[in-house]
Image: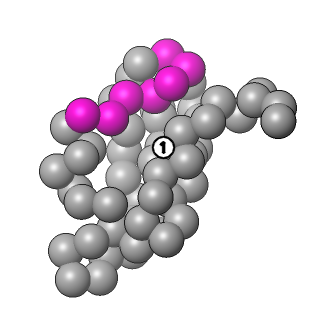
Amino acid sequence: MKKELMDKLACPECKGDFELREEVEDDEIISGELYCGECDETYPIEDGIPNLLPPDFEE
């Protein structure tokens, strides 16, 4: 995931801004998490892909 994507992402629950907690490799975010301070939810970033499914989402 590119850091520039942060300008376009919003929390799927409350539409708040994310705080990025990441591990960067060659200007790519490889792993970490997106944290929303508005609703206190955390979304993982794994293999460069953010998982923005709401926490209560059931398959």
The outermost residue toward the bottom is 26
Task: Name the image quarter holding residue 40.
Answer: top right
Q: How many marks?
A: 1
- The reply to whether residue 16 is in sight is yes
Residue 26 position (above or below residue 43): below
Residue drawn at (51%, 24%) of the image? 12
The quadrant in which the C terminus is found is top right
User: Can you say whether 21 is above or below 55 in the image?
Assistant: below
- Residue stretch in magenta: 8-14
Query: Please, what is the three-letter code of the amino acid marked with disc 1?
Result: Tyr
Q: Quadrant of the N terminus?
A: bottom left
Q: Residue at x 64, y 30 (%)?
A: 54
Query: For the point 54% across and 39% down, which residue is it?
Result: 52
Across and down, in percent, residue 3 comes to 22, 56
Please determine whether, in this image, residue 50 is positioned above or below residue 23: above
Question: Is 20 rendered above or below residue 29?
Answer: above
Provide the major secondary structure of the magenta segment: loop
Is residue 51 found inside the magenta-colored segment of the image?
A: no
The residue drawn where x is 46% and y is 28% is 11
Using a 10 Å C-alpha cutoff, classify the residue at mark 1 as few (fewer than 14 neighbours), some (14 to 19) or many (20 or more).
some
User: What residue does disc 1 label?
Assistant: 35
Q: Residue 22: percent from the left, percent from the top?
A: 39, 66
Residue 32 in percent (x, y) is at 48, 64
* Front residue of 23 and 48: 48
Residue 33 shows in the view:
no
Residue 49 lies left or right of residue 44; in this view the side is left
> Residue 38 vs residue 17: left or right?
right
> Which residue occupies the extreme front position in the image?
59
